[in-house]
Image (spheres, rainbow, N blue to C red):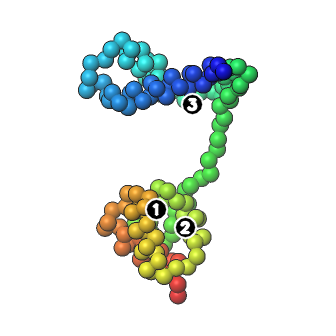
Amino acid sequence: MALPRIAISCGFLALAGLAFAVVGPPEHHQWSAVDRFLAAAIAPTPAQAAASPPALTSVTADDVTLRSVAVDLPDRGVTFPGPGSDAVNNNCLTCHSAGMVLNQPEMSRTVWQGEVEKMIGTYKAPIAQGDVGAIVDYLANLKGVN
């Protein structure tokens, strides 16, 4: 069974990306003609990088059509309210919306401490150790069991 041209093209691009990841930045090695070709084929020109997003397009190969789409993402401008919210706004909004956290059930300070530690340990949230206490205090005061 022959592979569709689009699959071959995607495979080539994936291989090229892997090559760049293995080879590293240009200042660390001597570039061959193939490296220069791949760099020119993949990297945008300065004019392309500065230009506005491309118009919607489509590509068809072997009866398969891929279309680009425009997506309007929801406004994530909502932050945590009130005093002591700086640590939570600076750390938690990276992954969570304020609404998602504010809709959690009330939990004890110990459970909130465990949740923050889980975010750091399990999910590798880049939270400074100095901010942990302020985050737990805020969540326990706002969404703690009374």
Please indicate whether residue 145 sits to the left or right of residue 4 in the image: left
The three-letter amino acid code for the residue at tag 3 is Pro
Q: Position of residue 123 (x, y in %)?
A: 44, 59
Indicate the secondary structure of the residue bearing disc 2.
helix
Are circles 3 and 1 on residues that touch, CB within 8 Å? no
Residue underneath mark 2: 101
- Quarter holding the N terminus is top right
How packed is label 1: few (under 14 Cα within 10 Å), some, or many (20 or more)? Answer: many
Of callouts 1 and 2, which one flags the residue occurring earlier in the amino acid sequence?
Answer: 1
Mark 2 and 3 residues: CB-CB less than 8 Å, in contact?
A: no
Residue 145 visible here: yes
Q: Residues within 10 Å of mark 2 (few under 14, many from 20)?
A: some
**Mark seen at residue 92:** 1
The type of residue carrying mark 1 is Cys
Query: Residue at point 56% right, 21% down?
Result: 9
Q: Considering only order in the chain, which callout, 3 or 2, is on the residue closer to the N terminus?
A: 3
- Front residue of this view, candidates 52 and 97: 97
Q: Position of residue 64 (x, y in %)?
A: 71, 25
Circles 1 and 2: CB distance less than 8 Å?
yes
Q: Quadrant of residue 117?
A: bottom left
